[in-house]
Amino acid sequence: MLLGLILVVPVIELVVILKVAGGIGVPETIALLLVVSAVGAWLCKREGLGVLRRIQKAVERGEMPTRQLVDGGLILFAGALLITPGFLSDLVGILLLLPPTRAVFRTALMAAIGRRVRVTTITTARNLRGYIDTSGSERP
């Protein structure tokens, strides 16, 4: 599946670029790809800094910034898509940068991860033969 995507997506991107170049011209197509990449880089920076602030606030409140970390990963992936030449990858990258559509991707990603990950909570004790009560004294 992944190998198929690696082989098929660049071919589709090339076909789309050639169709656009045939419609508007080669210089205009190159300019459009550069403009989309520049706007995408600006959006990546803006959204990334916003997520960083939300992560800091969550940590200050003593919360685990799970949602914000997933957003950060999606923004990083969007940046990678935007520096890859092609209109389809740019479209997906921009969709990942927009908060409403990123929320849809985030929900789907977190649900997929939740189905595959098993979380186990481990607690430790100072003395395995006894326990410590609320007064701080050990009991056997």
Image (cartoon, rainbow, N blue to C red):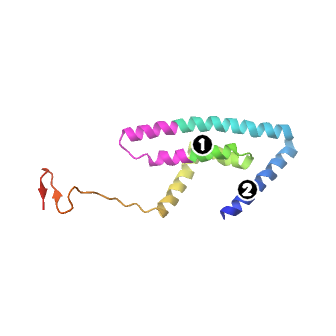
On screen, 111 above or below 80? below
- Find the residue positioned furthest to the bottom: 1
> Which residue in the protein does label 1 denote?
98
Residue 140 x/y as whole percent: 12, 62
The overriding secondary structure of the stretch rendered in magenta is: helix
The number of discs equals 2
Q: Which contiguous range is marked in magenta? A: 50-73
Most foreground residue, 98 or 64: 64
**Type of the residue with mark 1:** Leu
Which mark is on residue 9?
2
Q: For this view, does 32 lie left or right of residue 107?
A: right
Identified at 69% across, 35% down, the residue is 38
On screen, 71 above or below 121? above
Element type at marker 2?
Answer: helix
Q: Quadrant of residue 7?
A: bottom right
**Type of the residue with mark 2:** Val
Residue 102 x/y as whole percent: 57, 47
Identified at 37% across, 38% down, the residue is 60
On screen, 28 above or below 74? above
Identified at 51% across, 49% down, the residue is 70
